[in-house]
Each structure stands twice: as C-alpha cells, then as structure tokens.
Amino acid sequence: MRLIKSEVLPLHTDDDLVKVRQAVRAWMIEQAFGLVAQTKMVTAASELGRNIVVYGGGGFARLECLDDFYRLGFRVIFEDQGPGIADINQALTDGFTTGKGLGLGLGGAKRLVNDFEIWSEPGYGTRVTITMWK
C-alpha cells in the first residue's frame, strides 16, 4: 500500500470537528468519490470525531490518501489518549452508550465504510481507522 498524502488535524472542540468534516468532504471530492461515498464517510467521521471530543478528552484525526496499486483509497485515523473502551464488542452493539446518545455511533460508522478497525486499551486510549475504497 502506498501513502500518497496525509494531514493531521486536532480534535478538541466542536469547531475542530467541523474542520475535520469539511476536510474529509474536500479530500473525497478531490479524489472524485461520488456523493454517496462522501456522505457516508463524512457521517462516519462526524460520529467518530464527536466520540473523541466528548468521551476521549480530545485527540486528532489523520487523513490519508492512499492506493493499493489497484484502487484509490481514503482513510481517516481517529486517535485519543482518553479512558479507552473496556468492551469493544459491547461498544459496537447498537443501543449501547455510556453517555446520553442513542448508542449508534460506533456500529453505525462501521456499517458506513469499507474497512473499519478499532483498537482500545482502558487507560491508554482508542484508535479507530476507517477507509473508503474507490
């Protein structure tokens, strides 16, 4: 896999979240992804970014344009050093929440993208990687 370009954006406030959403859309337009793919990726990025701002104590989003020599991809890595997730399978279950939301964020984000990876360690933070391929 080849990394074509990348950019790291901070994620500490709602304004940062807006900037990440705008950047995700702009990068996908630049790579000529269709409107449906753009909308799915922006929605997933919004959910994951909000988790970092609300639950993770802030962090960052790394945007990456890449290819695997057969297709173009767009990947976003969300990472924080917050409290982490004790049970990832439970966190991915629709309806589970530790806050006031509907509990659809993580599972919903997973369903919206082509590739979804999550790592979390209580006390060390969480990293979620989402990728859309073209």
Image (cartoon, rainbow, N blue to C red):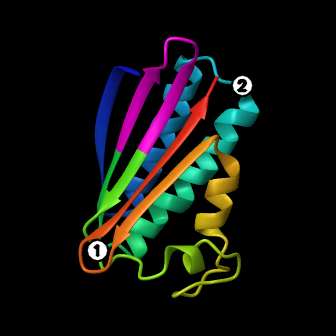
The residues tagged by marks 1 and 2 sit, at their Cα atoms, a distance apart of: 34 Å
Residue 100 drawn in magenta: no
Few, some or many residues within 10 Å of mark 2 (<14, 14–19, 20+): few
Residue type (three-letter) at the residue carrying disc 2: Gly
Quick one: SS at disc 2?
loop
Q: Secondary structure at mark 1?
A: loop
Q: In the rendered view, tell whether residue 87 sits above or below residue 27.
A: below
As drawn, 8 above or below 64: below
Residue beneath the point at 62% across and 17% down: 32
Question: Which residue is located at x 67 percent, y 80 percent?
Answer: 102
Task: Name which residue lies at 28% across and 40% down.
Answer: 8
Residue extending farthest to the top is 69
Q: Which residues are magenta?
A: 62-76
Residue bearing mark 2? 34
Q: Amino acid at mark 1?
A: Gly
Q: Which residue is mark 1?
A: 82
Q: Is residue 66 magenta?
A: yes
